[in-house]
Image (tube, rainbow, N blue to C red):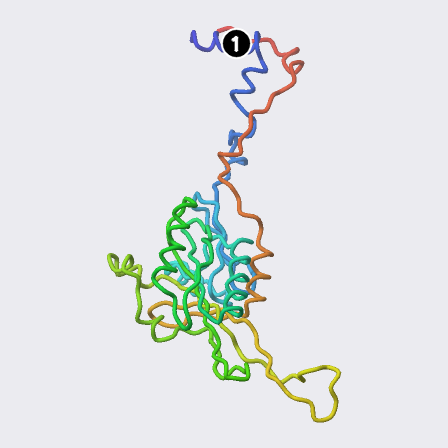
Amino acid sequence: MKHLSCLGLFIALCPTAFCNIYPSSLPLTEESKVTPWTDYYNLKGKLVKHVEDGLTDRHILQTRKSRQSVIDDYISKKYYLVNPAEDLVIAITEAYEKTEATNSEHYFAIGTKGTVSSVTSGSFGAVTTSASNQARRDLVDKGDLYAQDAHSHNNVYDENGEIVKYGKALPSTPDETHAPESDMTDPSLDQRVRIILGWREGGSIPSSVNTVGNSEIKRSRYRSIGFYNKSGKIATIDADQLMKVIRKLPPIRKNQLENIQPQSIPFNFFASHKPVIL
């Protein structure tokens, strides 16, 4: 019982010190015990699964469905974007803009924590090995490991600058058959999700809103994002829509234990509470 009497004396002499080493934000009661969790959203931005797994993640599943059997299946197969945030939106936009400017494919990697690498340049119709290696090295330099990647598909133009073939948001033959050497050590990694930044054709629009009569008609086009793996296409979504969903997600939460701050109880709290010496 001596340690209890010492504790009583310690509280009497320095109550604020006791409170600082025993912060009130710690989970002292059943009500305050909160297990960190992972939230899963679908492509409509709807929360479809809440899992108290000790993590602080939130992912976007590559489906518009909400049926739990589908959600559980996609989670088990890891068909989701890892912790997507504004840096992913920026990388998607940059890859599209550079693809349009140079008519060559561009690439970036995504880490296990959701970190996004720099956007690297490939060539016409292909992502070069040097481009993918450069992006993955950048990911490691940022303290993350490779989990997913994204690359753009360029359009094909004629001599007049008109599109004759769209770089669709679907896996090409090289996409379906190629696997980086680093993946071949573990065949299961060959089923990881990859992302295509492509295009889809829209409706006809006048070449100028001020033109009347026999105006030249051009086809509109939209940025379209596809998700696929070695088994084929998983889902597609317009790039603008995906970026809206990402921006509506709640901020990425940090581990709760990192945010515990000591809190003091006012000294006069103990004025009417005499220490019990046992």
Q: Secondary structure at mark 1?
A: helix
Which residue sits at x=53%, y=68%? 101
Q: Compared with residue 49, is residue 173 higher up or lower down, i.e. above or below?
A: below
Which of the two residues, 52 or 248, is positioned nearer the viewer here? 248
Percent position (x, y) of residue 117?
Answer: 45, 53
Percent position (x, y) of residue 91?
Answer: 51, 58
Which residue sits at x=42%, y=57%? 109
| Left or right position of 53 against 243 | left
Q: How many marks?
A: 1
Q: What amino acid type is highlighted by mark number 1?
A: Phe
Which of the two residues, 142 or 269, is positioned nearer the viewer here? 142
Percent position (x, y) of residue 206?
Answer: 67, 84
| Left or right position of 180 against 126 | left
* Residue found farthest to the bottom: 214
Which of the two residues, 150 or 17, is positioned nearer the viewer here? 150
| Left or right position of 261 against 194 | right
Percent position (x, y) of residue 67?
Answer: 48, 65
The crowd level at tag 1 (other Cα within 10 Å; few <14, some 14-19, many 20+) is: some
Which residue sits at x=36%, y=61%? 192
Q: Quadrant of the N terminus?
A: top left
List the residue tagged with mark 1: 10
Q: Compared with residue 15, is residue 201 higher up or lower down, i.e. above or below?
A: below
Which residue sits at x=51%, y=84%? 159
